[in-house]
Amino acid sequence: MQRYRLDIEYDGTAYAGWQRQSGQHSVQAAIEQAVLSFCGDRVSLRAAGRTDAGVHATGQVAHVDLSRDWPADTVRDALNAHLGKAEEAVSILAAVPVADTFDARFSATGRHYLYRILNRRAPPALERNRVWWVPKLLDAAAMHEAAQELVGRHDFTTFRSAHCQAKSPMRTLDRLHVTRDGDVIEVRAAARSFLHNQVRSMVGTLKRVGEGAWTPADVATALAARDRAACAGLAPPQGLFLVKVDYPAS
């Protein structure tokens, strides 16, 4: 039995999210089917993050145990061949043999997300499923200032889904940066772990600041309320990307 770390990229538009779900098309199930087609192993992948329906990844990480010790390039190329035959919007960027103590979820020390907002009057033609289109001009500098109210260790009840299964709402947000490059506003978030819908909830709230409807003080008040009803809004999934997962140096 050999364990492999899989580095994965996918367009989440057509999927019900990462996690396998009965009767639903998921990224996890697509890769597990590719493994079965490749080597006959019925496996259950564990990933660093369970992205929601419509959310993308350029740096998702999962691990899989195969019954045979295959060359890493063979695993990567074979899985991509079967994913391609099935016309899945999923690519295995790398397959690396790892110790059986490696766990894609529990060994992770940090997760990095990017949220992209297209801020212009004209709607997107090429990136309609990869950005949140906001036609009203947003003040990215004000959004960044307000974002700093959320950095640090807090009770993020206001910014998590009512269906979040985490045992505690306490999280340490290491970074929340907002920048503008032309018509695109990027929100970059980093933490050891995130609550369900936390990034999208924070972005939805920061948009209100960018519109001038909220101030940084309003964001601080919403955080302190520890009440989901105090969240200013939930950004749609298509602008969100899981871009990197950190692990201890080997």
Image (cartoon, rainbow, N blue to C red):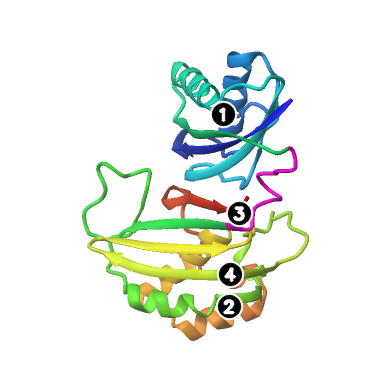
Q: Nearer the viewer, residue 190 or 232?
A: 190
Mark drawn on residue 25: 1
Tag nearer the camera, 1 or 4: 4
Q: Which residue carries the number 4 mark?
A: 173
Q: Which residue carries the number 3 mark?
A: 249
What is the spatial separation of the Cα atoms under label 4 and label 2, in whole angstroms?
16 Å
Q: Which residue carries the number 2 mark?
A: 222
For badge 2, the amino acid type reads: Ala
Q: Quadrant of the N terminus?
A: top right
- Identify the residue at horizontal 67%, vertical 47% (top origin): 105
141 with respect to 90 (left or right): left
Is residue 19 at all visible to an observer of this figure?
A: no
Tag nearer the camera, 4 or 3: 3
Q: Are marks 4 and 2 in contact (CB under 8 Å)?
A: no
For badge 1, the amino acid type reads: His
Q: Is residue 109 magenta?
A: yes
219 with respect to 186 (left or right): right
